[in-house]
Image: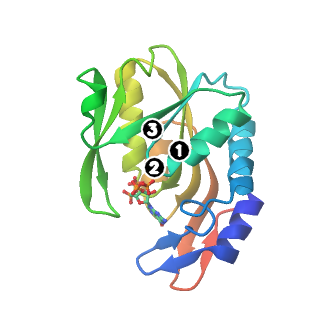
């Protein structure tokens, strides 16, 4: 997505260790017009897949899950919650997610009453690095008996293994910007 790539080059920053900072327009201070264009791009990519609902994980994924759901015709959005969620009760699907960035493991939860068997699910998230968050969501979809139609990612870090692993599983993965390589002051995108 040209607009997104241009914006990353213009307003993104690079941290040592292969981290892209995008908090001035994407996941902290949110450019809502860009967020809507991102939602429309995912809606266009999955328009023929009869998606019933969108599943994401808190926090930043919610922004793009919402804009995608609205662009696809006001679909429901299910937000996997992190940490202990007593108010969801025991009636939950869970998956453990290791964060390479934060070096921590957290458990994500989705209430069983929120994700129904047979529903056609699209996963949306902001970043894909090693793929742990996405693998956790995939695990939850499997446990629920819903049907996974694919995943949409705003920024994939192509130099980490998550994207390849997900594609090798036969899952359709649409990333709007794939960062192929980074140095301390520049980055390149895959065509
Ligand atoms: P993985 O899920 O693909 O394995 O990735 P990883 O554990 O490395 O990512 C953990 C968190 O770090 C995720 O946010 C992810 O969005 C974020 N992240 C990964 N790489 C980058 C990056 O280059 N730049 C930025 N800005 N973020 C990155 P989170 O902490 O789980 O959730 P959220 O609350 O920020 O949404």
Give the CA distance from mark 2 to mark 1: 6 Å
Q: Is residue 170 above or below residue 154?
A: above
Q: Say which quadrant the N terminus sits in.
A: bottom right
Give the CA distance from mark 1 to mark 3: 25 Å
Task: Tell me the quarter of the picture where residue 180 sits.
Answer: bottom right
- At x 63%, y 26%, the residue is 75
Give the CA distance from mark 2 to mark 3: 26 Å
Q: Is residue 63 above or below residue 115?
A: below
Q: Are marks 2 and 1 in contact (CB under 8 Å)?
A: yes
**Pointer 2: residues within 10 angstroms few (<14), some, or many (20+)?**
some
Front residue (pair 82, 50): 82
Residue designated by label 1:
62
Farthest residue toward the front? 87
Q: Say which quadrant the C terminus sits in.
A: bottom right
Is label 2 in a helix, a strand or a loop?
A: loop
Left or right of 87? Residue 25 is right
- At x 38%, y 20%, the residue is 144
Residue 31 image point, x, y percent: 68, 60
Residue 30 image point, x, y percent: 62, 59
Is label 1 in a helix, a strand or a loop?
A: helix
Q: Is residue 88 above or below residue 37?
A: above
Mark 2 and mark 3 lie on one chain; the one further toward the N terminus is 2
Front residue (pair 49, 75): 75
- Mark 2 CB in 8 Å range of ligand 1? yes
Residue designated by label 2:
59
Residue 144, numbered circle: none
Residue designated by label 3:
169
- At x 56%, y 78%, the residue is 13
- Mark 3 CB in 8 Å range of ligand 1? no
């Amino acid at each position: 997505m040209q607009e997104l790539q241009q914006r990353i080059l213009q307003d993104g920053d690079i941290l040592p260790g292969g981290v892209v900072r995008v908090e001035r327009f994407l996941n902290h201070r949110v450019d809502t017009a860009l967020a809507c264009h991102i939602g429309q791009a995912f809606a266009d990519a999955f328009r023929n897949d009869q998606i019933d609902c969108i599943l994401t994980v808190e926090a930043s994924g919610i922004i793009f899950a919402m804009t995608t759901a609205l662009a696809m015709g006001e679909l429901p959005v299910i937000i996997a919650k992190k940490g202990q969620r007593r108010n969801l009760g025991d009636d939950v699907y869970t998956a453990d997610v290791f964060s390479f960035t934060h070096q921590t493991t957290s458990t994500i939860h989705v209430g069983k009453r929120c994700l129904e068997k047979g529903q056609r699910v699209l996963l949306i998230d902001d970043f894909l690095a090693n793929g742990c968050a996405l693998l956790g969501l995939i695990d939850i979809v499997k446990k629920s008996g819903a049907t996974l139609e694919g995943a949409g990612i705003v920024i994939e870090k192509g130099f980490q293994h998550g994207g390849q692993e997900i594609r090798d599983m036969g899952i359709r993965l649409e990333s709007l910007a794939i960062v192929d390589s980074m140095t301390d002051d520049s980055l390149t995108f895959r065509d």
